[in-house]
Amino acid sequence: MAVVAEEVLFDLLSEESRRWLASQGQRRTYEGGNRIHSRGDGDPTMGVVIQGQVRLFQLRPNGTHTFVSMVKTGAHYGDILLFRGKVRTHDALAIGPTVVDHYNPAAFARLLSNTEIVQALYKITAIRLGRSMAMSDDLRVLPREVHLAKVLLNQWRQRGDRDWIVCIQEDLAGMVGVTTMTLSKSLARLRDEGLIETGYRKIRVTNSEVLKAWLKRRLTK
């Protein structure tokens, strides 16, 4: 699966703070494919993924969906609801066996008394905001295949420099902000350049250094 929400709360916390964080939430277990929450739910809680992954998406009336993010183990989501007090804006699905700690408004208020946790949440929010602004700029000014190449290179880095990126085209299209038809055309251009190979639900970066050099040339034009 493609991963967008790469910031991991646990990576910024000491073991002591992790244990205390866990003690404040309500732990729930989900089977793969279980719906954790639906868009429109009045459920102002923050979730921290303890095991597995959570897929955030928007289900459309015509049955299609728009991929938003994949939240991996140790990361959090939904904290903005505790400040805005509104309903859920996305659907959430468990990918494989998944465990999530949920924090209601009272529990979240307790978290804000922990300086280390507040600093970690603030840092992650700032990083995500910066990335969202950069992605918005890319959508406005970059050719689609260049934007896609940037996303694929980032995915490759997140996966520990492994060649194959496992993903669904609909999810990747949502990340790049295009239709699946436009995505297919962009993938074909990168494939014709010899930068990637495609397979069933996976994409291979054939040579990361060549891809980096190609991107550098295109970004400096």
Image: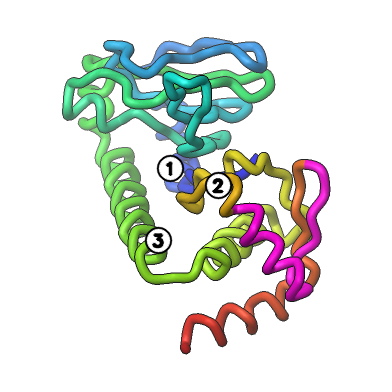
Residue type at numbered disc 2: Ala
Badge 1 crowding class, 10 Å Cα cut-off, few under 14, some 14 to 19, many 20 or more, is some
Residue 66 seen in render = yes
Q: Which mark is residue 13?
A: 1
Left or right relative to 196: residue 126: left
Q: Nearer the viewer, mark 1 or mark 2?
A: 2
Q: Is residue 81 above or below residue 70?
A: above
Q: CA distance from mark 1 to mark 3?
A: 33 Å
Sequence-wise, the earlier of marks 1 and 2 is: 1
Q: Are marks 1 and 2 in contact (CB under 8 Å)?
A: no
Identified at 26% across, 18% down, the residue is: 87
Left or right relative to 154: residue 46: left
Depth check: 217 or 104 in front? Answer: 217
Residue type at numbered disc 3: Leu
Residue type at numbered disc 1: Leu
Q: Nearer the viewer, mark 1 or mark 3?
A: 3
**Can you tell which quarter of the image residue 210 is in?**
bottom right
Sequence-wise, the earlier of marks 2 and 3 is: 3
Left or right relative to 130: residue 63: right
- Highlighted magenta segment, given as a residue range: 183-200
Task: Tell me the SS state at disc 2.
Answer: helix
Q: Which mark is residue 173?
A: 2
Residue named by callout 3: 139
